[in-house]
Amino acid sequence: MLRYLLEKEIKQFVRNSFLPKMVVMLPLMAMLIFPLIANFEIKNLNLCVVDHDRSSQSQKLIQKIQSSRYFLITDVAENYQKAMLQVESNNSDMLLEIPVAFGKDIDRGTSTTVLIAANAVNGVKGGLGSSYLTAILQNFSVEIATQIQPTKAIPQGAGFDIIPRFWFNPTLNYKMFMIPALMIMVLAIVSGFLPAMNIVGEKESGTIEQMNVTPVGRFQFILAKLIPYWLVGFIALTIAVLVSRWVYGFKPQGSIVTVYLFASMFMLAFSGFGLVISNYAKTMQQAIFMILFFLLTFIFLSGFYTPIDNMPQWGQVLSNFSPFKFIIQSVRLVYLKGCGFADMLPQFFALFGFAVFFNGWAVLSYRKKS
């Protein structure tokens, strides 16, 4: 009986003019576009400069700032008031004021100061921009000190060198953090959204009533709805993996088999969740609203964009009810740290628990009506 049900589902899927195209185009577009725009790196900050000194040293500083990948010099204002107008009108994000005698003070070896003012309406942008500019100024100060006193010995123990080591993502490329999560987003839409829409679509068209009068059991019916979309999910995941490898040069540090193992458990869990929604929804509109509500909730609780540790304590507790949290953690650990199955047993058992719970609920909540 299951064989014929699967044959029916596969034929319905292939005959659909939209779904096969979506399964191919969704991972392609998601992996080609989203990593470029879903990016929390702060670049191309608009900087307004007020240069009261106009010396060679102030020009070197401006050139050093301009050569970084973080700032764009949008204007060179005559005074602080005009620079503030640029910030208030959102033409500039920050301003840098260089005082008179800046170059002379540097040449004499005396201390000097500059002013940094940032638009902090966007706190992340203002804070990181100020940190970037401060780091550039500190680097400029070290260069100047080396040029002025190149042979001056530094007393033993008078200072220390900071040599940062960035583990697992040495280039601090935010795309490497986002790509595994985007893979899971594609997987969730294909393996959870589509099965739910399939059943609700049959309710609206009336064809499910024909299934309800047959001797097909609830377990067989649910399984026949799930298996084709598991296969489609693996196809979508494979496309996403290949795009991340060929376009971004991003490959897993661990075993790709581990990624597929955890992805299969997640698809089993989230497909069951989609079927639970479809059992309660009577129309396509109801199903879409319900799935979107829970999908967005799961995403925000999963650490998709920001670390879970940044959440309040109650948010961290609620995040344990999101299957996205555990699958995103698993894929990131494999891709970035090269972890194996034994290193991620808590995540695996959590996904297994979600799979048992949602699929059991889906079978029990399905009601045949004659």
Image: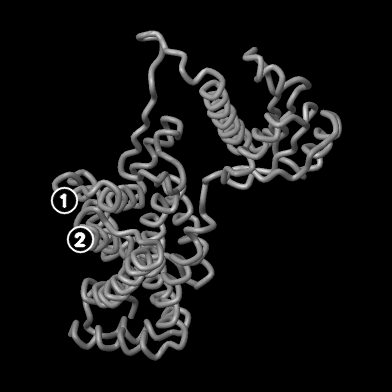
Amino acid at pointer 1:
Phe
Residue 283 is tagged as none
Mark 1 neighbour class, 10 Å CA radius: few under 14, some 14 to 19, many 20 or more = some
- Residue 3 in the image: x percent, y percent? 19, 85
Quadrant that contains the N terminus: bottom left
Amino acid at pointer 2:
Leu
Residue drawn at 34 percent across, 34 percent down? 165
- Residue 326 in the image: x percent, y percent? 30, 48
**Disc 1 to disc 2: CB gap under 8 Å:** yes
Quadrant that contains the C terminus: bottom left
In the depicted view, which residue is nearer to us: 303 or 5? 303
Residue 341 is tagged as 1
Q: Taking 59 as reference, is 277 left or right?
A: left
How many numbered marks are there?
2
Q: Is residue 254 visible?
A: yes
Residue 261 is tagged as 2
Residue drawn at 36 percent across, 59 percent down? 184
- Residue 346 in the image: x percent, y percent? 21, 43
131 vs 306: above or below: above
